[in-house]
Amino acid sequence: MHQNLTLVEERIHRVLTERIVPAVYSARVPVTLAAWMVPDEPVPASEALSAAYTPFAVGDSWGRAWSTWWFEVTGEIPADWAGRTVELLLDPGFQGDWPGNQAEALVHTPDGVQVKGIHPRNHYVRLADEAAGGESVHFFVEAAANPDILKNDFVPTAYGSKKTAPEAPIYTFRTAELAVFEPEVWALQFDVEVLYQLLKELPETEPRRHEVLRALERALNVLRLDDIVGTAAAARAELVDVLSRPASASAHRLSGIGHAHIDTAWLWPIRETKRKTARTFSNVLALAEQYPDFRFAASSAQQYAWVKERYPHVWEGIKAAIAKGQWIVVGSQWVEPDGNLPGGEAMVRQITQGMRFFRDELDVETHGIWLPDSFGYTAAFPQIAKLAGLDWFLTQKISWSQTNKFPHHTFWWEGIDGSRIFTHFPPIDTYNSTLEGEELHHAVRQFRDKGVATTSLVPFGYGDGGGGPIREMMERQRRVESLEGSPRVEIEHPDDFFAAARAEYPDAPVWVGELYLELHRGTFTSHAREKRGNREAEHRLREAELWWTAAALKGAEYPYDALDRLWQGVLLQQFHDILPGSSIQWVHEQNEEDYAAALAELDRSIGDALAAAGLSGAVVNSADHARRSLALDAEGTPLALVETPALGVASLTPVAPVHPVRAERVGDDLVLENGLVRVTVDARGLVTSIVDLGVDRELVPEGRAANLLRLHQDLPNAWDAWDIDAHYRHTFDDLDAADAIELSVDGDLRARVSVTRTFGTSRLTQTIAVNADDVRVHFGVDLDWNEREKLLKASLPFVVHAHHHSAEIQYGHVRRATHTNTSWEDAKFEVMAHRWVHVEEPGYGIGVTNDATYGHDITRTVGASGEVETEVRLSLVRAANSPDPVQDAGHHTFAYAVHPGADIAAVVASGYEQNLPLRRPGAEAATVEPWSVLRSTDEGVRIEAVKLADDRSGDVIVRVYEALGRRASTTLVPGFAVASVDEVDLLERPLRDDMARSRRLAHEGDAIELELRPFQVVTLRLTR
């Protein structure tokens, strides 16, 4: 017999796609439609069910962008369909076959109970396994006319906001009918599909490939194309033998878990995500009834909270599925947040709020971090997770790195303090697997731990926009659970996968430090106002908790519920497509509104707390070190130089500066000086000299200028809001032309130069200021930004021979190379820092702090004099066109400072001061005795949180960390009586035996002695 393999393969493919798949439904009859367009935003089902519906037909158009329509569906199962399996098929106008980024629908009973969601790959409702014939059909369908934002890739679109979206309808209803479902044809479809996909993956020299091919050929030979329903069973019989051959003992094992990655916002607003959860979760519950061996994992407590509030029937179904072991709560966090930008305390609260919700509402304890789709992961994560009692970490996103392949799929990840967490990257390289043969074999080929590990995890189900697993995936899984030539796919709880993987591979390799994604670097900067909102909200929450604790110590009632609600709102905005700035216009418009409301409420709350504590007339220092700083009025004018204790209050009592400020004009230059630092500003408004007078050292390289703003062309190859590509560096304009330069002096307290510039269609004012008794140089930018596809950076070149820079992250800092010896270092051309970066050579360092900037680049070069120069640049603002075509347009403010001669301890303190300005007294200043809620005697042991315990016992919770990367001993001195002190985990429970503890904890009288390891985080419960 001649080997006509290609022709047989072509035949299999055509018969499968053109004959077998269409024959799954053997008879169809139309149903009747009626429609009601919701006038504005979505309404509850109870309101929609009583609305006035008008006749509607297949072929009619519906749905301007973001509108909601309800359709009433009525019909009758034909009498001659008795005994047949019958389904309702609906297609409201799907575009392509990927769910989540287009029209979606949720089917309800006439009583308003959710049945299941409808999307392009799941457009059926099972009506009867065996119909009686003559049954009436009656449903209501809530349909969302969500536009496909990325239909044209990254072309700017007006569809990202209701305010700008066109009015014309964007969908045409295609299908509304009852159909007879043929189970035997359905089973044949997947017998053939799975085997066909298997043979395509097997090498031509593999006998198994030929065995499968000939079996498929025999099956098609007995399949009558004019009677597929009648001959499907005979065709299937020809495949029994090849389908029953088990996988080899050495076959790679894929631990499968149903999954639906639902972005809390992205190409749709938060209001749509609330409905996406109901559609997806309804589908999952329906699938669980159909497939008892199916299991599904879902993260994000916020999404569960929405379901509980809005969809009680779905909520009860979730609880029932949990009880049966089919629904698995994973993730441990409030949302799946960005992995870099949230502060340390916010990352803790993501976990504590998430775990507390799962425990209280679902009686579930989670054991790992499930974060498949974030844009890199901070080196603080391992310690934070372990201190919450979590044992494993999962992500997939690092596989997107463009330059270097990560060397492991299963490994121990070590954080900055030495904590390690068992980590897995699914080698299938997706969190949206469909379990098709190509994906399964890709996972085996990619797996980097062959020979030492035999198992990897595969999350399957449509995601990003939701949808979740579908029955087609379960049919594939059942056939490849053990199939010769294929990796095995077994449904398994993620906890069980991680336990087995750890037992199999206890000596897995160790990766130390951050998991840097070599992609999506623009997310450190996109939507700068959002970054500011996040930074300010995190710090004001710190203040609110601190001062309400102070008030509670004096008998006031602590606002637990209000603070929880405010925290949850901020945690929601830290979702990994909101805070990074990579969502549509609607999302970011709402974000700015929500931050404005939250910040206003927090300011009121802090004022109320100070009043309740009897401190409303005091100068308030929310930083955890004593300060000698300027107190400013509401307009930013200096009131006085004052001294305040750590985490404390003092009267507005001016102190005379030891180093008063003076300013003078020297030729064309302006010189600002205070005896500690001297700054020269030239006729262009650029800083040509910063001299540290304490050591008589010039910081600015000869011929260079500090605080030069450089405007770069910024058009990445793809993923506009997400990416900054390295080629941006080659095209730029220096903003060195000044419209006006003004000098202002506030007595001996402050001297400031203001420089106004215009460029393109934008305008800005830069300020350079020196304050009394302060070695720092303070910079500000007030910007009206109207550019597109541009990136604005602020440059600070220094004469310092730095091999590395240090950058603040959560509860510590990381060191990164300033050189590009390897491709790994070269790929870090844009990096993230929180409140500061630091560059140093032996004996001298310089700090750069900021109040709302995250993106930086730090490079080294050899200057004209032959000295090594290190340049710190802050990425201030971008102007990408997709997915938000007006990204960042409008008004911005930025503040940053240079700290000459700073060591790490000094720049840590400066970072706190930059972000926690002194709070001035209210309308009437009062005389108060200086008082601290709590203070630390070691400058490197920082107090990050002071709050009352979540259990509402009245105990005070204190979280401290070692910030400098060395062993430290400190004495914590509370400003209130303490009866006992216990070390607890992040959920304020006693530490487990396997949790890291402080090196020493002792309490006697009003002193708490504490010894910490480098970068260690410790949480204490103080009982009064």
Image (spheres, rainbow, N blue to C red):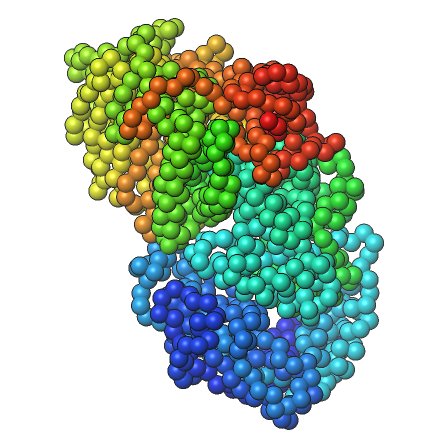
Based on the displayed image, in which of its 4 quarters is residue 321 positioned?
Answer: bottom right
Give the answer, above or below, for where 261 lies relative to 137.
above
| Residue 715 vs residue 992, the one in the foreground | 992
Q: Give the quadrant of the C terminus.
A: top right
| Residue 70 vs residue 30, the one in the foreground | 70
In this picture, residue 349 sits left or right of residue 998? left
Q: Position of residue 245 (x, y in %)?
A: 82, 65
In this picture, residue 544 sits left or right of residue 963? left
Count of labels in the image: 0
Q: Give the quadrant of the N terminus.
A: bottom right
Determine if residue 870 is in view.
no
Residue at left 68%, top 62%? 320
| Residue 828 vs residue 272, the one in the foreground | 272
Residue at left 25%, top 39%? 784
Q: Position of residue 727 (x, y in %)?
A: 40, 38
Residue at left 38%, top 73%? 37
Q: Position of residue 261 (x, y in %)?
A: 56, 55
In this picture, residue 664 sits left or right of residue 614? left
Residue at left 36%, top 41%? 600
In this picture, residue 229 sits left or right of residue 118? right
| Residue that lies at the very extreme toward the bottom in this rendered image | 80
Q: Position of residue 981 (x, y in %)?
A: 64, 25
Give the answer, above or below, for where 261 lies relative to 78.
above
Determine if residue 351 is in view.
yes
